[in-house]
Image: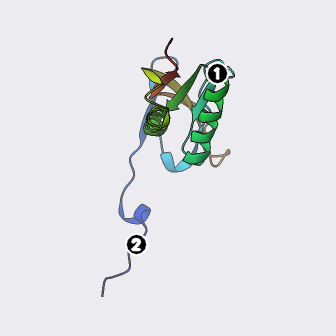
Amino acid sequence: MAEPRSPVSASVPHKLMVLPTPEGSTLEMDPLEYTLRKRLPRKLPKRRNDVYVNMKTDLKAQLARCQKLLDAHREICIHGLGLAINRAINIALQLQTSSQGGALQLAANTSTVELIDDLEPDDLDEAGEPLTRTRNNSAIHIRVFHPNA
């Protein structure tokens, strides 16, 4: 019989995070004293034919929405960020496969998006002020369109 596991925090020492400050110096912080809040990414201009794919919405619902938009427009643009890149590619390829005789073409572009996270102290009395950090994430933009006849 296996022994019960002890909590990870008790057996594994945690490391201090080193964050750069706007002044150019660095700041050491204990990640257990802060709560990470991820901000929404700055989005491209929202047009009627833009679809922003995420991992929370059902795949079939996102696919149906894209198909409905394609019925109304000659082209749509599918955007995926981070983990949703694979889903955006999957949706675009499914749309192309289901089109009659390969009537749809795809044009994909990749980019890097800068994201901002807020680090809020758990205990306002002991910890310092809220911090922010920036990080980069991959993105894909797939143009799905009917070629000119």
- Residue 96 in sight from this viewpoint: yes
- Answer with mark 2 or mark 1, whichever residue precedes in sequence: 2
Mark 2–mark 1 distance (CA, rounded to whole Å): 57 Å
* Kind of residue at badge 2: Ser
65 and 134: which is toward the camera: 65
Task: Choose mark 2 or mark 1, whichever is in front.
Answer: 1
- Circles 2, 1 touching at the beta carbon (< 8 Å): no
Q: Mark number for residue 6? A: 2
Question: x%, y% of residue 117?
Answer: 56, 33
**Camera-nearest residue between 123 and 139:** 139
Residue 3's place in the image compared with 50, above or below, is below
Q: Is residue 34 above or below residue 41?
A: below
- Taking the image as drawn, is residue 130 in sight? no
Amino acid type, residue under disc 1 in the picture: His
Tag 1: Cα neighbours inside 10 Å, few (<14), some, or many (≥20)? Answer: few
Q: Quick one: SS at disc 2?
A: loop
Q: Secondary structure at mark 1?
A: loop
Query: Where, quadrant-wise, is the N terminus in this rendering?
Result: bottom left
Residue projecting furthest to the left: 1
Residue 115: % across, % down: 53, 27
Task: Where is residue 128? Give x, y as percent.
Answer: 61, 37
Residue 73, disc: 1
Circle 2 packing at 10 Å, graded few (<14), some (14-19), many (20+), is few
Q: Nearer the viewer, residue 47 or 112?
A: 47
